[in-house]
Image (cartoon, rainbow, N blue to C red):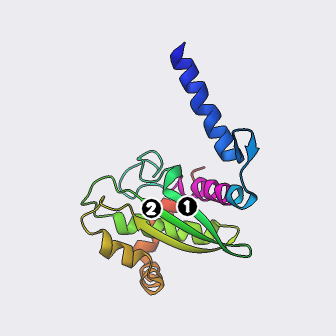
């Protein structure tokens, strides 16, 4: 019985959090809008496939709902911050995963945005270097000019049928 009540309580708190309701009152409209946008972003990135494994980034817990933050920075413009966690601290494909996140969001986000993608602090041995690479527009553009790399990115970001 206590397990059922615990699950019910957890589910109810998530529903209230994502609906913008808390303790019987509404969250401020701006905050609720940012939460909605964060869920929208998460829904886009959760289906990206890992470059090495047949799993999605969500299944491997590389991305979670809590790794997405959205803040309004102007009228109808948002700052989207993603903090993803590679599966191992020496993951050789962390840069490629960051590139996949960036490309999929650039293609799919239906609202004006500025995008920042980072490796979660302390989860990779070269996180500073990778963070610089995946947030440098010129490096991203150069990477996408490489036909082999572009093909891998396309395979990872294409939605499953």
Residue placed most toward the observer, 127 or 4: 4
Instruction: Specify the quadrant of the image occupied by residue 17.
Output: top right
Given contact means CB atoms under 8 Å apart, are the residues at marks 1 and 2 in contact?
A: yes
Q: Tell which of 22 and 99 is nearer to you.
A: 22
Q: Residue furthest top?
A: 1
Which quadrant holds residue 42? bottom right
Image quadrant holding the N terminus, namely: top right
Residue 13 falls within the magenta-colored stretch: no
| Residue 36 percent coordinates (x, y) | 68, 55
Residue sitting at x 38%, y 60%: 120
> Which badge, 1 or 2, is on the more N-terminal residue?
1
Q: Which segment did they paint magenta?
A: 34-48
**Residue 116, image x and y in percent?**
50, 72
Q: Note whether 83 is above or below 27 in the view shown.
A: below
Q: At numbered mark 2, what does the secondary structure look like: helix, strand or loop?
A: strand
The image's mark for residue 69 is 1
What label does residue 10 carry, if any?
A: none
The residue positioned 64% from the left and 33% from the top of the image is 12
Q: Nearer the viewer, residue 7 or 142?
A: 7
- Mark 1–mark 2 Cα distance, whole angstroms, equals 9 Å
Quadrant in the picture for residue 4: top right
Whether 136 is drawn above or below 10: the answer is below
- Residue 40 lies, in percent from the top left, at 65, 56
Q: Can you identify the residue that label 2 sits on?
A: 83
Residue 42 belongs to the span the image colors magenta: yes
């Amino acid at each position: 019985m206590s397990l059922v009540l615990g699950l019910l309580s957890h589910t109810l708190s998530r529903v209230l959090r994502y609906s913008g309701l808390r303790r019987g009152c509404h969250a401020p409209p701006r905050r609720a809008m940012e939460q909605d946008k964060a869920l929208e972003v998460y829904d886009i990135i959760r289906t990206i496939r890992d470059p090495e494994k047949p799993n999605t980034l969500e299944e491997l817990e590389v991305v979670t709902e809590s790794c997405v933050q959205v803040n309004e920075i102007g009228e109808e413009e948002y700052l989207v911050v993603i903090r993803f966690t590679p599966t191992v601290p020496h993951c050789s494909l962390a840069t490629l995963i960051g590139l996949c996140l960036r490309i999929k969001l650039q293609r799919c986000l239906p609202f004006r945005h500025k995008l920042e993608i980072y490796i979660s602090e302390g989860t990779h041995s070269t996180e500073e270097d990778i963070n610089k690479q995946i947030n440098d527009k010129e490096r991203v553009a150069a990477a996408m000019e490489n036909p082999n790399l572009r093909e891998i990115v396309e395979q990872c970001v294409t939605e499953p049928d």
